[in-house]
Image (cartoon, rainbow, N blue to C red):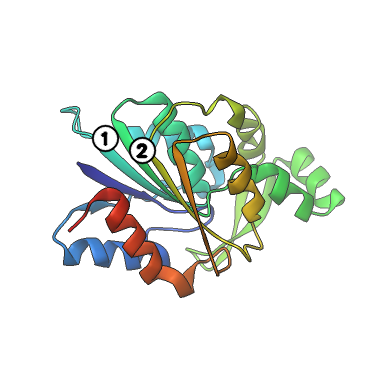
Amino acid sequence: MQYIYLHGFASSPKSAKAQDIGDRFAKIQTKLKIPDLNAGDFSQLTITRQLTQVALEFPDDSLPVTLIGSSLGGLTSVYLGQKYPQVQRLVLLAPAFGFLSHWLPKLKDEELQRWQQEKHLMIYHYGERRSLPLSYNFVTDATQYKEKILQLPIPTLILHGKQDEVIPIVASRDFARSRPWVELVELDSDHGLGNVMEEIWQAICLFCQLH
């Protein structure tokens, strides 16, 4: 089994969650790949680019893959599972279901208009600790991904904080409700999940049968 961790939007492989989970995998001597989804050019990030990039990380000997995805990385993981039979398990940490519907309303109308007109908007990048331009292609690309098509019964574990201020937990509840193969664990945490990493690790170990 190949394990791959997908970090969130405007984040990096150096994020607290990626580092924490990476360290825990190292302790049990199990390899965890953590690709940099910024791919050296955050400005041209799209969900489509992430899907293409991560698929190239899959082993070419049809070894099964477990994806662990955080936020937008979680959403990307579900689409990868839909497309590639190699993906046999999904662990989603505060997955960004309905990402545009939660994120775009937080932008002021004039910001959104300027983004459409000028084609780039400055976004604070937590991995880089500075603002970077993001192309409007990110939005146009994301609109083509419709979550109702995500119907492949892949064993899925969702871990989501009840106080999530970025992606409300109701997004995961709605996703899990109509998909009996999805197990949702609700945690007493926010979007960062920083205070429940031990609980998350125990849940991952149980779900993935890691020892």
For label 1, the residue is: 58
Q: The N terminus lies in which quarter of the figure? A: top left
Query: 192 or 119, which is in the foreground?
Result: 192
Image position of 14 (left or right of 63)? right
Question: Residue type at mark 2?
Answer: Val
- From the top left corner, tell me how far across and down residue 8 is, in percent: 49, 53
Q: How many marks?
A: 2
Image position of 29 (left or right of 103)? left
Query: 25 or 131, which is in the foreground?
Result: 25
> What SS does tag 2 mark?
helix
Marks 1 and 2, how far apart in space?
Answer: 7 Å
For label 2, the residue is: 54
Q: Are marks 1 and 2 in contact (CB under 8 Å)?
A: yes
Q: Quadrant of residue 164?
A: bottom right
Vertically, is 118 above or below 80?
below
Vertically, is 202 above or below 182?
below
- From the top left corner, tell me how far across and down residue 25 is, in percent: 23, 61
Q: Residue at x 52, y 66 (%)?
A: 192
Q: Residue at x 60, y 43 (%)?
A: 97
Vertically, is 53 above or below 186?
above
Q: Is residue 15 visible?
A: no
Image position of 1 (left or right of 125)? left
Image position of 44 (left or right of 64)? right
Question: Residue type at mark 1?
Answer: Phe
Residue furthest to the front in view is: 180
* Mark 1 neighbour class, 10 Å CA radius: few under 14, some 14 to 19, many 20 or more: some
The label number, if any, that marks residue 156 in the structure image: none
Q: The C terminus lies in which quarter of the figure? A: bottom left
- From the top left corner, tell me how far across and down residue 14 is, in percent: 38, 64
Q: Is residue 175 visible?
A: yes
